[in-house]
Amino acid sequence: MLWFKHLTSVIGVGETAAAHFPAELFLPEWFNRPEEVTSYLGLAPVVRSSGRSPTRAKPRPVRQKRLRGILVEAA
């Protein structure tokens, strides 16, 4: 379980968060870049801007709320 060692080596990520990670991602090989994982989990905000209107950023709606909550708490 190399992924488990990598995840638990991050400060703040314990065994609980590391165990939920593969359960929520199902097939991590679907993702080619870390940015894709953050977007999938709703950790990357959606930024919208057009012309002169102010830029707005809001969280992306996702179904993986449990893992996102665990990772936010770990941070």
Image: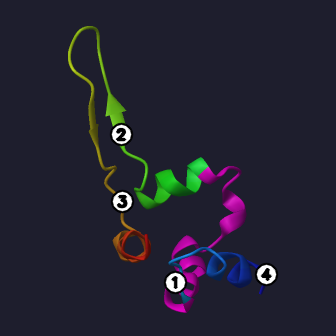
What quarter of the picture does the C terminus occupy?
Answer: bottom left
Q: Which residue is mark 2?
A: 46
Labels 1, 4: front one? 4
The residue at 79%/81% (across/down) is 2
The amino acid at mark 2 is Val
Q: Which residue is mark 1?
A: 20
Q: Observer-nearest residue: 75 or 27?
A: 75
Mark found first going from the N terminus, 3 or 1: 1
Q: Which residue is mark 3?
A: 62
In space, the residues marked 4 and 2 are separated at their CA atoms by 32 Å
In space, the residues marked 1 and 2 are separated at their CA atoms by 24 Å
In space, the residues marked 3 and 2 are separated at their CA atoms by 12 Å
The residue at 36%/75% (across/down) is 73
Q: Quadrant of residue 46?
A: top left
**Which span of residues is magenta-colored?**
15-34
Lateral position of residue 9 relative to residue 46, left or right:
right
In this picture, is 39 found above or below 20?
above
Q: Main secondary structure of the magenta part?
A: helix
The amino acid at mark 1 is His
As drawn, the label of residue 2 is 4
Residue 21 falls inside the magenta stretch: yes
The amino acid at mark 4 is Leu
The residue at 43%/76% (across/down) is 74
In this picture, is 73 found above or below 30?
below
Residue 33 percent across, percent down from the top left:
67, 49
In space, the residues marked 3 and 1 are separated at their CA atoms by 16 Å
Residue 44 percent across, percent down from the top left:
43, 48
